[in-house]
């Protein structure tokens, strides 16, 4: 059973639009939710992360919205740029990283000019 | 400049051969991780190391073992590699999990 689910699998937006990526999780003990992005033939890189004490985390054009009650979060990419085209992974960890990360299967985002 | 290194970057082995994948970090991180990434399965955690000689199984440890004799080095070992271990292997370091560049392993 997939502990972290992402939707959609792929997403296409035009330059300047807002891309919305969704993520949900099963395990109530998860207490750290990072998003990674990965470009083809490269390794994943930490983009932005949130802890359940907050329901929103912003970093430039990237914002995480978090709903603890529904066990859902979303990543919003505003003013999308072609350089944002990548696969985005939602991940979760329990016990302050001690258990490692459980990753979703990713959302492939394509931004067209 | 923080760095996670992995060697080799590419490796082709025959089924039944032994495989050693190496990872290094220069940030004195206590915790290091090994993941594998496969199409359709995403990234899966193989092993965690909390420090020298303090290792713990992740979600898919079967067929793998690890060694951490120095804080800056973490090795993944496949004894008698199998074709289904063909994958891209990533090492990560630290609580924020900085990822290395990966090793693309093919087992024929």
Image: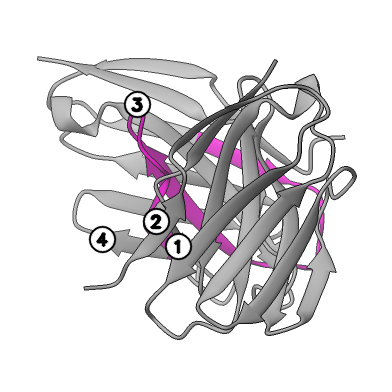
User: What secondary structure is the stretch in magenta mostly built from?
Assistant: strand
x, y percentage for residue A85?
Answer: 27, 26
Q: Considering only order in the chain, which callout, 2 or 3, is on the residue closer to the N terminus?
A: 3
Residue that label 2 marks: A46
Q: Chain of mark 2?
A: A
**Looking at the image, is mark 4 or mark 3 nearer the viewer?**
3
Residues under labels 3 and 1: Cα distance?
Answer: 22 Å
Mark 3 vs mark 2: give the one in front. 3
Q: Are marks 1 and 2 in contact (CB under 8 Å)?
A: yes
Query: How far apart are labels 1 and 2 at the CA level?
Result: 8 Å
In the image: residue B80, left or right of residue B42? right
* Other-residue count near label 1 (Cα within 10 Å), few / some / many at <14 / 14–19 / ≥20: many
Nearer mark to the viewer, of 1 and 2: 2
Q: Around disc 3, counting alpha carbons within 10 Å, would you say few (fewer than 14), some (14 to 19), or many (20 or more)?
A: few
Q: Is residue A16 above or below residue A65?
A: above
Nearer to us: label 3 or label 1: 3
Label 1: state its secondary structure.
Answer: strand
At 55% from the left and 57% from the top, the residue drawn is B22
Distance Cα–Cα, label 4 vs label 1: 10 Å
| Mark 4 / mark 3, whichever is N-terminal | 3
Look at the image and say whether residue A26 sits in the magenta stretch.
yes
- Mark 2 and mark 4 lie on one chain; the one further toward the N terminus is 2
Q: Which residue is mark 3?
A: A40
* Rendered location of residue A25, percent (x, y): 72, 47
């Amino acid at each position: 059973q997939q502990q972290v689910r992402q939707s959609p699998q792929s997403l296409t937006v035009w330059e300047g639009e807002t891309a919305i990526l969704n993520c949900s999780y099963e395990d109530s003990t998860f207490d750290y939710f990072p998003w990674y992005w990965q470009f083809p033939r490269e390794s994943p890189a930490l983009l932005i992360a949130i802890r359940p004490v907050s329901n929103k985390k912003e970093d430039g054009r990237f914002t995480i919205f978090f709903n603890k009650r529904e066990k859902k979060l979303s990543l919003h990419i505003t003013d999308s740029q072609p350089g944002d085209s990548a696969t985005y992974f939602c991940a979760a960890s329990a016990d302050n990283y001690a258990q490692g990360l459980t990753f979703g299967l990713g959302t492939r985002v394509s931004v067209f000019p | 400049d923080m760095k996670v290194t992995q060697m080799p970057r590419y490796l082709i082995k025959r089924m039944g051969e032994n495989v050693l994948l190496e990872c290094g970090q220069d940030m004195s991180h206590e915790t290091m991780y090994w993941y594998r990434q496969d199409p359709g399965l995403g990234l899966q955690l193989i092993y965690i190391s909390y420090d020298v000689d303090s290792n713990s199984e992740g979600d898919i440890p079967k067929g793998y073992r690890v060694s951490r004799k120095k804080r800056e080095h973490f090795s993944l070992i496949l004894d008698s590699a199998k074709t289904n271990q063909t994958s891209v292997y990533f090492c990560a370091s630290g609580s924020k999990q900085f990822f290395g560049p990966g090793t693309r392993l093919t087992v024929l």
